[in-house]
Image: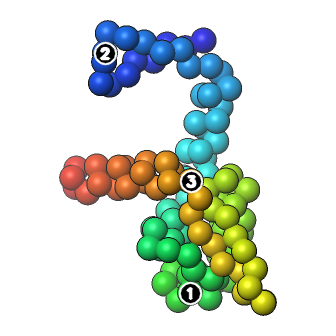
Amino acid sequence: MVKATKTSAPDKSIAVTDAQIEKAAEVFRVMSAPMRLRIISCLCNGEKNVGELLGEINTTQPNMSQHLNALYLAGVLDKRREGVQIFYRIVNNHIVSICRAVCQQTALES
C-alpha cells in the first residue's frame, strides 16, 4: 500500500491500494489524448450526436468514432441511439471536474 495525504488535512493519511492507483492510471491514459479532451469540452454543454461533434471538432468521422468509443468504454460517456443517429453525453462528472481543473491551472501558468 502507498500512503497519500489529503490536501485539506495534511496530518491525516489515507491508504491507497494498488487497484486504486491502477484505476487512476487508466483514467489518465484515457484522458491523455487532446481529441478526447476536446470531445469532453463540447459535451459539457449537453448531449450531442456525432454530426454535431464533427461540426465543432476538426477531425474525420472514423477518428471521432474511435475516441468516442474509448471514452464510452472507460465510463466517461454514455450513448443512445435515435434512428440512425447516436447521441453522446457525459456520465462521469468527476472526469469533467479534473479536466477543468487541469485546463484552468495550465491557463494560469501560461
Neighbour class for label 3 at 10 Å: few (<14), some, many (≥20)? few
Residue type, label 3: Asn
Q: Is residue 45 left or right of residue 106?
A: right
Element type where label 2 sits in the image: loop
- Residue 8 lies in quadrant: top left
Q: Nearer the viewer, residue 13 or 39?
A: 13
x%, y% of residue 68?
66, 68
The quadrant holding residue 107 is bottom left
Seen in the image, is 13 located left or right of residue 87? left
Q: Which residue is mark 1?
A: 52
Q: Earlier in the sequence, mark 3 or mark 1?
A: 1
Depicted 38 relative to depicted 10: above or below: below
Lower sequence index among marks 1 and 2: 2
Residue at left offset 51%, top offset 65%? 40
Answer yes or no: is residue 38 visible.
Answer: no
Please name the residue that numbered disc 2 is placed on.
10
Residue 92 got which mark? 3
The x and y percentages for residue 103 are: 35, 55
Residue 89 picture location, percent across and down? 59, 69
Query: Height in image: 109 above or below 19?
Result: below
Characterize the local packing of mark 2: few (<14), some (14-19) or many (20 or more) Cα atoms within 10 angstroms: few
Residue 67 at x, y percent in the picture: 66, 66
Q: Which SS class for mark 3?
A: loop
Give the mark, 3 or 2, whose residue is nearer the N terminus. Answer: 2
Q: What residue lies at 40% left-to-right and 18% top-to-bottom?
A: 5
Residue 67 vs 83, above or below: the answer is above
Q: Are marks 3 and 2 in contact (CB under 8 Å)?
A: no
Q: Is residue 105 visible?
A: yes
Element marked by disc 1: helix
- Taking the image as shown, residue 4 lies to the left or right of residue 52, namely left
How far is mark 3 from mark 1, CA to CA?
21 Å
Question: The residue under label 1 is which amino acid type?
Answer: Glu
